Amino acid sequence: MLSARERAHVTQVWDLIAGHEAHVGAELLLRLFTVYPSTKIYFRHLGTCPDEAQLQSHGQRMLAAVGVAVQRMDDLRAALSPLADLHAQVLRVDPANFPLLIQCFQVVLASHLQDEFTVEVQAAWDKFLTGVAVVLTEKYR
Ligand code: ZNH
């Protein structure tokens, strides 16, 4: 559960991303695939070297889901339930990949926000994204 202050940090940063989901999402995926190439096995259909359009298209969908999670922070489990089914039952993404994505997400935020990405803002985003990952991976049984 995020405190009021943590929520404010998450929402304020989201307001900067909103409208740029495709661009930020593509940057995030490029970083993920480059720094952690093992994550690419789930995206074989995109080829060995996904082009910018593919990165933007998937990045847009992924970040739109993060946007929904921001809007429904109190209600994450219900908000992300269909997506949790998809990851657990259809995509079968190893949960170990989620911390890698979270790490890349924070680096993308830091590179854009610079000094504004304070330790407190990072801590709030880490908690929020970990909460999202918990929901997306809890149906694996
Ligand atoms: Zn995921 C898909 C989100 C993580 C892999 N995803 C997806 C989608 C979304 C998402 C929204 C779409 C769906 C539909 O279309 O229906 N994810 C997400 C989020 C997260 C994630 C939010 C966190 C935070 N994923 C992840 C990871 C991985 C993945 C970590 C690995 C590495 N996904 C994936 C895949 C897919 C998805 C493979 C499919 C793609 C296509 O289809 O193309």
Image (cartoon, rainbow, N blue to C red):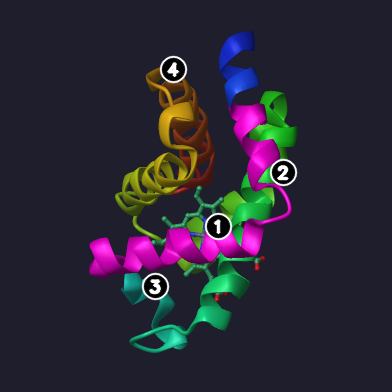
Q: Amino acid at mark 2?
A: Val
Residue 114 lies, in percent from the top left, at 42, 36
| Residue drawn at the location 66% of the way across and 29% of the way down | 11
- Please tell me which residue is depicted at 35% across the width and 61% down the height of the picture: 32
CA distance for labels 1 and 3: 20 Å
Q: Is mark 1 within 8 Å of ligand 1?
A: no
Q: Which segment is the magenta one?
A: 10-39
* Placement of 36 over or under 41, stated as above or below: above
Question: Residue 24, which numbered label?
Answer: 1
Q: Earlier in the sequence, mark 2 or mark 4?
A: 2
Residue 70 image-quadrant placement: top right
Relative height, residue 14 to residue 50 (above, below): above
Type of amino acid under label 1? Val
Q: N-terminal of the two: label 3 or label 2?
A: 3
Instruction: Give the image location of residue 57, x and y in percent.
Output: 62, 74
Quarter occupied by residue 44: bottom left
Q: Which residue is mark 3?
A: 42
Q: Along the horizontal axis of the image, is 112 left or right of 49?
A: right
Label 3 CB-ligand 1 distance < 8 A:
yes
Q: Check if mark 1's residue and mark 3's residue have beta carbons within 8 Å.
A: no
Relative to the observer, which residue lies in front, 96 or 20?
20
